[in-house]
Amino acid sequence: MTRDRHHQGPLEPQEVEELLPWYVTGRVSREDAKGIEAGLKAMPDLTGKLADVQREREAVARAAEAVEPAPPENLQRLLQQVETTRQWRVPRTDGQTHASGRLKAAIGRSIVWQAAFALACVAIVFLGIQVYNPPAPGELGLATRIGDPGDVTLLVTFQPDARTGDVAALLTSVNAAIIGGPKPDGAYVVQIPAGRAGHIDAVTASLLSRQDLVAAVLRQE
Amino acid sequence: MDLLSARSADAAASDGQLLARIARGDKDAVTALYRRLERPLFAFLVKTLRDREAAADVLNETMLDVWRQAGRFEGKSSVTTWIYSIAHHKAISWLRKRREMELDEEAAAQVADDAPAADSVIAAQDLAQTIARLMERLSVDHRVVLQLAYFQEFSVGQIAEILDCPENTVKTRMFYARQRLRALLEAEGIQGAAA
């Protein structure tokens, strides 16, 4: 733990006291440790507080060490559950799908093929621009840059067996993108551009209608 | 590789290496990581939930999530911090299901109190037992922060990651946890033993 870079003066007594629980376990930065030691020398009453913290720590550690281990059958039960539980794969929406890996393998390292592939991509983008008639900003949200102020985020939990391509297609269909996660509960942070923010209920409903892919949707405050 | 060699290789592997093997579907790595974390993680869950059976269930649910999500681990935090974060989340969910969050303080106050008489002389080793007993009467937030700092020896930053809260919140919780502990000790007639 390191203090604010703008706050490099001596530690206040309250700061020293706050850090004592981490000082006794050696989990403060070298800089903070020096500040605490200087504080302990300058303020003798803090020495008594350090002794209190050490007593608390000893009591907590002793009590935790006295906890009997988990029942031995717990590991067997876990391994049985593992046998019947599929691992989750990372849904990606940044174009790095498994399909792209296969395409890369198919193109190979040949300069000619790579150049041809690059030309084809340029041609597709050019044709796309020609045929695409962009809506007014905010009309459909398609022209709204992801990351605008006013964007709304949702916490979306996907089904464990959801396929990457299906998830990507679903998110594209509602003009959403994964911008973070997974959280400890497995949820991803999904961003809805500002242009679609007014339709958040409709977007949520669209996501929830795909129960084969989406387990839960929560509006992030 | 024989069984003994495989086990010593597992013991030498870092948490990150074990997690990478789990992501590839290696079930032996699940066993190795479970054995490595079982004691401290189970103790943390028992002290958080105050229920051994529930702690065993949550331990398994946590490790099952590690199995499911190993491929999604991005290395933004340490493996241990990530696993404790999952365990804490599941423990809080379990408590919420039991509606213990709202009743926690009330329930804590009703924990059977086999305290010695207030005017009895408490020796140093008894003081440690008294502090440990009184900790059971703290709220779940306070128990968790004390466990993570004092027993698991996580830094403020790591605890903030586990609890998904700012570092200042961790320090504030620790401050109030210690203040509450001091009040409980004073209620037992023990002055100046904590905080």
Image (cartoon, coloured by chain):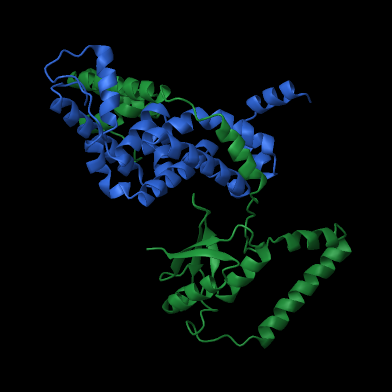
Chain colours: A green, B blue
User: Residue B184, percent across and down?
Assistant: 18, 30
Q: Is residue B147 visible?
A: yes
User: Residue B133, percent across and down?
Assistant: 28, 26
What residue sits 72% from the left and 83% below the top? A127
What residue sits 51% from the left and 69% below the top? A146
What residue sits 37% from the left and 20% below the top? A62
Quadrant assignment for the N terminus of chain A: top left
What residue sits 19% from the left and 19% below the top? B116
Quadrant assignment for the C terminus of chain A: bottom left
User: Residue B137's image quarter?
Assistant: top left
In the rendered image of this protein, does residue B131 appear above or below residue A219? above
Instruction: Indicate left or right for A187 with B102 as reference.
Output: right
User: Residue B175, percent across and down?
Assistant: 25, 35
In the rendered image of this protein, does residue B63 appear above or below residue A25? below
User: Residue A29's image quarter?
Assistant: top left
Instruction: Indicate left or right for B45 with A164 as reference.
Output: left
- Quick one: A219 or A102, which is closer to the camera? A219
User: Residue B132, percent across and down?
Assistant: 30, 25
Tally of marks: 0
Q: Is residue B81 visible?
A: no
User: Residue A89's image quarter?
Assistant: bottom right
- Quick one: A105 or B85, which is closer to the camera? B85
- Quick one: A74 or B35, which is closer to the camera? A74
In the rendered image of this protein, does residue B133 appear above or below residue A78? above
